[in-house]
Amino acid sequence: MKAPRWRKKILITAAAIALGIQFIPVPRDNPPIVKELVWDSPKTRSFAQRACFDCHSNQVRWPWYSHVAPVSWMISKDVRDAREMLNFSAITSDDDFDFVAKRINKAVMPPKKYLALHAEANLTDSEKTAFLAGLKKSFELSGL
Ligand code: HEC
């Protein structure tokens, strides 16, 4: 049975839109590293790298789906918003351990939707405790 013409038209239009939006430029950068914390140990940094760097750093590993609109728009915006709040590659005097610790303690960060796709970012309770202790020391060593 032949599909009615209007249905074909809708399908073609939808396909054209899906293709067309791929050409809208999406910022997906990794600017130079300005200033990291003075890490108390490589381990603390590796926890941050596992759980936070994909949004809160200039060392984001952009996954393949970050190249496919409209998912790319959401990821790009998340990274921009996240960097504005806290950028582990551009630490400023405004950064504050207690502020960061609260998000980790309440399990707000890393976001659930991210953990669903990145099992390695899911820190166990003991890893979380070690991360928080190391992060506190690192903020102190950084004079923050
Ligand atoms: C998938 C991306 C992503 C990851 C991974 C992630 N964050 Fe975030 N984070 C965001 C976004 C987006 C915001 C800004 C919007 C918001 O507050 O939800 C944010 C906000 C924050 C804020 C500010 C919150 C506020 O209320 O002002 C802190 C602090 C923070 N994140 C810490 C962390 C820490 C620490 C980690 C690692 C344990 C982490 N985040 C992992 C995306 C992420």
Image (cartoon, rainbow, N blue to C red):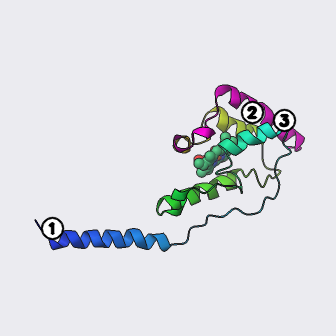
Q: Dot 2 corresponds to which residue?
A: 132
- Is 66 on the left-hand or right-hand side of 97? left
Q: How many residues crowd around disc 1 within 10 Å: few (fewer than 14), some, or many (20 or more)?
A: few
Quadrant of the image occupied by residue 104: top right
Cα gap from disc 3 to disc 1, whole angstroms: 66 Å
Q: Position of residue 117 (x, y in %)?
A: 53, 44
- The outermost residue toward the left is 1
- Is 12 on the left-hand or right-hand side of 82? left
Q: Who's the residue at 53% across and 63% down the image?
A: 67
Q: Position of residue 50 (x, y in %)?
A: 67, 42
Label 1: state its secondary structure: loop
Give the residue type that dot 2 points to: Leu
19 in magenta: no
- Callout in the foreground (3, 1): 1
Q: Dot 1 corresponds to which residue?
A: 3
Counting residues from the N terminus, which is met first, the one under dot 3 or under dot 1?
Answer: 1
Label 3: state its secondary structure: helix
Q: Do the residues under discs 2 and 3 have CB atoms within 8 angstroms?
A: no
Q: Dot 3 corresponds to which residue?
A: 137
Check the picture and name the quadrant holding the C terminus.
top right
Counting residues from the N terminus, which is met first, the one under dot 2 or under dot 3?
Answer: 2
Give the residue type that dot 3 points to: Lys
**What secondary structure characterizes most of the magenta part?**
helix
Counting residues from the N terminus, which is met first, the one under dot 1 or under dot 2?
Answer: 1
Magenta range = 116-144
Q: Who's the residue at 42% across and 73% down the image?
A: 20
Give the residue type that dot 1 points to: Ala
Q: Is residue 103 above or below residue 126?
A: below
The foreground one among 91 and 27 is 27
